[in-house]
Image (cartoon, helix red, strand yellow):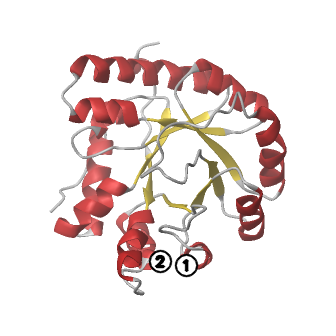
């Protein structure tokens, strides 16, 4: 089936507000407030808020998670490493969604996808408990068949494809690699959908590179954070989100209103 033959549907936009907390923590102050950022994002039309509570608490804090969860009317997507500490917090908080991600203490940002296949025995009971508590579990994975099939085997209803390689290739003007990565995302998003998974994508997207990803019809949601928070310094968070939404809608063939 060609892309043109598939019914059009709008992409959901999840806004990650981690790096509002990064700026706050740089001075040890109470501002800027990530809770306020979540509320602004909701007002601007975000479909969900993503926040990653890291083991070292380098940005989002436990209190941030609690306040955000209680302050927004759209879903909270709680990103977390697959550890017993984070599991306990998620089971107590009961966010709408939990995205399990790999985490290395020394990394600047998430460097790749979770090994759902290799970590099956560790992940399976965690995914079961989260699902039983009412949270929808997502796995942040590389776009490969083995990881998609592992997600199905684990009973995770959602996967988020790591788009960092494409975004880095795009930024470096490596058109051959960027094109190959897009083809891989297209194929794996289609396979994920055929396997009964809801397929999301995230990591590294900007105004310049988002449209080719947003055009992939089997994707349901994009999660974007660092770029939007950076752009907000110059244009404001609401305008940055509105522009990203416009680009995503245009990629799907929907008319979008003017953005200042």
Question: Can see residue 172?
Answer: yes
Tag 2 and tag 1, C-beta contact below 8 Å: yes
**Dot 1 surroundings within 10 Å: few (below 14), some, or many (20 or more)?**
few
Asked if residue 136 is positioned above or below residue 144 in the image, the reply reads: below
Front-lying residue, 189 or 205: 205
Residue depicted at x 35% and y 56%: 226
Badge 2: how crowded within 10 Å, few (<14), some, or many (20+)?
Answer: many
Residue 253 seen anywhere in this rendered image of the structure: no
Q: Residue at x 34, y 30 (%)?
A: 166
Residue at 40% of width from left, 69% of height from top?
22
> From the viewer's perspective, is residue 99 above or below residue 213?
below
Q: Quadrant of residue 235?
A: bottom left
Q: Is residue 21 above or below residue 220?
A: below
Q: Is residue 148 above or below residue 88?
A: above
Q: Return the mark for residue 35.
A: 2
- Residue behind mark 1: 71
Q: Relative to 230, is 46 on the left or the right?
A: right
Q: Secondary structure at mark 2?
A: helix
Residue placed furthest toward the bottom: 30
Q: Residue 171 location, x and y as percent?
A: 22, 36
Q: Disc 2 to disc 1, how far (Cα)? A: 7 Å
Please, what secondary structure does the residue beneath circle 1 have? Answer: helix
Residue 71 position in % (x across, y down): 55, 78
Front residue of this view, candidates 177 and 196: 177
Q: Position of residue 95 (x, y in %)?
A: 67, 63
Instruction: Out of 135 and 124, give the one closest to the viewer.
Output: 124
Q: Quadrant of the C terminus?
A: bottom left
Q: Nearer the viewer, residue 81 or 136?
A: 81
- Nearer to us: label 2 or label 1: 2
Horizontal relation, residue 194 to residue 14: left or right: right
- Which residue appears farthest toward the front when viewing the image? 106
């Amino acid at each position: 089936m060609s892309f043109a033959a598939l019914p059009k549907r709008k992409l959901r936009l999840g806004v990650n507000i981690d790096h509002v907390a990064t700026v706050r923590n740089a001075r040890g102050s109470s501002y800027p407030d990530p809770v306020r950022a979540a509320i602004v994002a909701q007002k601007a039309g975000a479909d969900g808020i993503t926040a990653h509570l890291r083991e070292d608490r380098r940005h989002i804090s436990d209190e941030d998670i609690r306040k955000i969860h209680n302050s927004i009317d759209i879903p909270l997507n709680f990103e977390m490493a697959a550890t017993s500490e984070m599991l306990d917090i998620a089971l107590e908080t009961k966010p709408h969604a939990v995205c399990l991600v790999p985490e290395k203490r020394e990394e600047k940002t998430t460097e790749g996808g979770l090994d759902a296949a290799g970590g099956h025995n560790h992940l399976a009971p965690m995914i079961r408990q989260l699902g039983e508590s009412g949270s929808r579990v997502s796995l942040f994975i590389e776009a490969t068949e083995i990881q998609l099939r592992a997600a199905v085997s684990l009973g995770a209803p959602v996967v988020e494809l790591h788009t960092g390689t494409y975004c880095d290739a795009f930024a470096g003007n490596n058109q051959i690699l960027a094109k190959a990565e897009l083809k891989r995302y297209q194929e794996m998003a289609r396979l994920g959908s055929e396997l009964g998974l809801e397929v999301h994508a995230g990591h590294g997207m900007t105004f310049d590179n988002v449209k080719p990803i947003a055009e992939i019809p089997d994707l349901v949601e994009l999660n974007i954070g660092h770029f939007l928070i950076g752009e907000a310094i110059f244009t404001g968070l609401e305008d940055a989100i509105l522009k990203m939404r416009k680009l995503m809608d245009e990629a799907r063939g929907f008319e979008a209103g003017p953005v200042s």
